[in-house]
Image (spheres, rainbow, N blue to C red):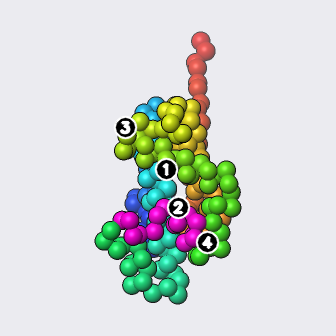
Amino acid sequence: MGVARAGTCTRSGANGVAAPRWHDLLLDAAGALPKIGTALVLAATSLEVFIADILDGLAQGSQLPGALWNWLNHRGDWQKDPSTEEQFDFLLAHFTGHSLKENQQLWGAFKNIRTARNTFVHEGAAKLGGKVVTLAEATQFVIKTREIVDWVRPWLPPDFQWPHLELKTSMRMEMKLL
C-alpha cells in the first residue's frame, strides 16, 4: 500500500486496514466540536499532515533525488520550507498534474481554515474578516477538510489511495411477548 510506504499509516483496525495519520486528526477535529479553535487547529493540522505525507510518498516514487526532496522540505527554517499552500498547489501539480486551486470552492475553504486556525493560535480567537467564526462555520470547515482530502484522492496512484472508511451501524431490538 503506497500510503504505508509514505509513512502515513499509524495503526491497523480490526479488519487489518491501516488508517492514515491525517484521518485520526480529522476525526479528532470533528470530536472537538463545539470547541471551535481546537477543531480548527486539528482540521488544519490534518490537512498539513495529509499533504506532507502524500507528497513525501509521491517523491519517493519519482525521479526526484531523495536528497533534493529532503533539502527542499527541511531547510532548518520553516519559512524556507514550502508552505502548505505551495504543497497543495505547485508541488501537488508537479506530481499529479492537478492543484487544489482547480476547485475554487475547496481552495477558498482551505484558505479560510488556515486563516481561522492562525487567528485562533496567534490571537486567541478564530476569526475570518475580523468576525469570530461561529460553531456552524467551524462545523462546515471540518466537513470541507474531508472534502479536500476526498477531492485529491483520485489524482493519486492506486496504491496511494486509502480505503474509504465509513461508519456503519445497525440496531436490532427484540421483545418477548407474553
- Name the residue tied to disc 2: 85
- Residue type pointed to by label 2: Glu
Q: Which of 66 and 79 is in front in this view?
A: 79
Asked whether the residues under the numbered discs 3 and 2 touch, taking CB atoms below 8 Å apart as contact, a structural biologist would say no
Q: Which amino acid does label 1 sit on?
A: Arg
Residue that carries the numbered disc 4 in the rendered image: 93
Task: Look at the image and tell me whether residue 129 can be seen.
Answer: yes
Compare marks 1 and 4 and give the one earlier in the sequence: 4
Q: How many marks?
A: 4
Task: Give the extent of the magenta segment.
Answer: 78-93
Q: Are marks 4 and 3 in contact (CB under 8 Å)?
A: no
Q: Main secondary structure of the magenta part?
A: helix
Residue that label 3 marks = 124
Q: Quadrant of residue 97?
A: bottom right
Q: Are marks 4 and 2 in contact (CB under 8 Å)?
A: no
Q: What residue type is labelled 4?
A: Ala
Label 2 secondary element = helix
